[in-house]
Image (spheres, helix red, strand yellow):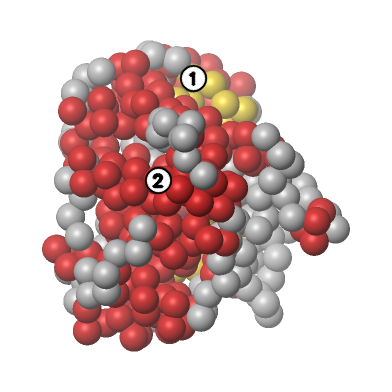
């Protein structure tokens, strides 16, 4: 395999760092008490959502923490697309209860909420002041010891340096992040994933694949992120249909938990891609499920993008299990696009229209996506007109090109 970096990007000063210890195994959750205690935590704010809490998923975690002598304060109010007001509520509870650590149990929303709370309890003002944008303040302090325990295999937030928070006033999802916000520890236990319903397995799994593909092909990619991205793709192609079809398949759940984490690592310190620019701007306007809308967008985005880096798209086809032996690079790149369409079909992902998005919104959505920071770095240059085309493909309003 060639170096896969363009010479102009070799002039950039690249970094890859991860402050998160990654521990995993079937039944690994039984170690959570000792592990959190070893981080110096005596009183943890347990951040989760009502669905996970009512399903009893946090019960054994609370038990293990208490047995190790770690007090637990419950914050089980996490909402999808977590808003600024939720972070404020969590951080005032953290301060009021004198907590000294965070344990997030759930999907990306719970983990990002915990990161946001971590920012507010170690910095002046609101998490809103620390948006990764010009004119805003950079993070200065490490958040309190955060342990992430994902119950889905998708977001990768367990190891990423990002939190995505919704500003309801601006109808805008913003990022805050950097190494200071990352978890201290993540515990991956595939047993926590077996109760995930098939449609959640499907959409979060394709989200993980989208992270791997977008990070592998973005301008900021580097060899270390390429390596984890490719393995994430292989695992998704091998295990996602199995986990979708048989929720209790622990080998498949293990593989998908690894895939999501590896895809999270592939973010490195930057991430970029049209599907995440589109889904993030859309999610600020209407409450779509992130993974589901990313999944519906990935085929059209790859159909647009493959010409930006045919070599890499050909490698994606191989990682997804396509036999490219007799194919030219271009044929293999197009095969990667078609494999994505096939996967989304096999997993019964509903199209955008069924997700409550109207084609009438295309012009606004294209405009908003242009303003998202993840647009820069997409493997093929994008204009508002190009986003309109991608959105039209999502609604089947223009013919397929591969
Ligand atoms: Fe995502």
- Judge by depth and name the residue closer to the eye, 112 or 241: 241
**Camera-nearest label, 2 or 1:** 2
Residue drawn where x is 34% and y is 48% of the image: 338
Q: CA distance from mark 2 to mark 1?
A: 34 Å
Specify whether 319 is left or right of 11.
Answer: left
**Residue at mark 2:** 335
Are the residues at dot 2 and dot 1 in contact (C-beta closer than 8 Å)? no
Viewer can see residue 117: no
Question: Where is 131 relative to 109, above or below?
Answer: below
Q: Which quadrant of the structure image shows residue 288?
A: bottom left
Q: Is residue 364 left or right of residue 195?
A: right
Whichever of labels 2 and 1 marks the residue nearer the N terminus, that label is: 1
Quadrant of the image for the N terminus? top right
Residue at the limit of the structure toward the left, as seen here? 354
Q: For the C terminus, which image quadrant?
A: bottom left
The residue nearer to you, when weighing 295 against 395, is 395
Q: Which residue is mark 1?
A: 24
The relative height of residue 217 versus residue 25 in the rendered view (above or below) is below
Q: Is label 1 in a helix, a strand or a loop?
A: strand
At 77% across and 47% down in the image, what residue appears? Answer: 15
120 on left or right of 300: right
Q: Position of residue 187 (x, y in %)?
A: 48, 26
Residue 188 visible? yes
Residue depicted at 20% across the width and 60% down the height: 351
């Amino acid at each position: 395999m060639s170096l896969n970096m363009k010479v102009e990007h070799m002039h950039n000063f690249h970094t890859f760092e991860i402050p998160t210890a990654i521990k995993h195994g079937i039944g690994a959750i039984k170690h959570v008490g000792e592990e959190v205690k070893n981080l110096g935590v005596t009183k943890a704010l347990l951040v989760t959502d009502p669905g996970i809490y009512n399903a009893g998923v946090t019960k054994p975690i609370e038990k293990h923490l208490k047995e190790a002598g770690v007090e637990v304060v419950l914050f089980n109010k996490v909402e999808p697309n977590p808003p600024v007001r939720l972070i404020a509520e969590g951080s005032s509870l953290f301060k009021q209860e004198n907590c000294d650590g965070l344990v997030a149990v759930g999907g990306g929303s719970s983990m990002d909420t915990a990161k946001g709370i971590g920012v507010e309890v170690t910095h002046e003002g609101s998490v809103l002041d620390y948006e990764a944008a010009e004119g805003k303040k950079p993070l200065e302090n490490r958040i309190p010891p955060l342990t992430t325990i994902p119950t889905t295999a998708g977001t990768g937030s367990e190891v990423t340096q990002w939190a995505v928070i919704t500003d309801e006033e601006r109808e805008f999802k913003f990022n805050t992040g950097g190494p200071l916000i990352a978890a201290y520890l993540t515990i991956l236990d595939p047993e926590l994933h077996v109760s995930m319903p098939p449609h959640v397995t499907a959409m979060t799994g394709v989200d993980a694949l989208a992270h791997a593909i977008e990070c592998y092909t973005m301008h900021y990619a580097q060899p270390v992120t390429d390596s984890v991205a490719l393995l994430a793709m292989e695992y998704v192609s091998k295990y996602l249909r199995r986990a979708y079809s048989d929720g209790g398949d622990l080998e498949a759940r293990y593989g998908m938990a690894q895939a999501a984490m590896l895809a999270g690592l592939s973010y490195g310190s930057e991430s970029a891609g049209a599907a995440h620019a589109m889904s993030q701007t859309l999610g600020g306007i209407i409450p779509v499920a992130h993974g589901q809308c990313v999944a519906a967008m990935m085929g059209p985005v790859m159909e647009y993008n493959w010409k930006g880096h045919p070599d890499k798209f050909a490698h994606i086809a191989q990682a997804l299990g396509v036999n490219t032996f007799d194919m030219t690079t271009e044929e293999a790149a197009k095969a990667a696009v078609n494999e994505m369409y096939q996967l989304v079909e096999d997993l019964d992902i509903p199209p955008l229209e069924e997700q409550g998005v109207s084609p009438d919104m295309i012009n606004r959505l294209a405009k908003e996506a242009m303003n998202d920071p993840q647009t820069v770095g997409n493997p093929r240059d994008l204009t508002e007109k190009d986003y309109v085309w991608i959105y039209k493909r999502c609604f089947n309003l223009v013919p397929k090109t591969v």
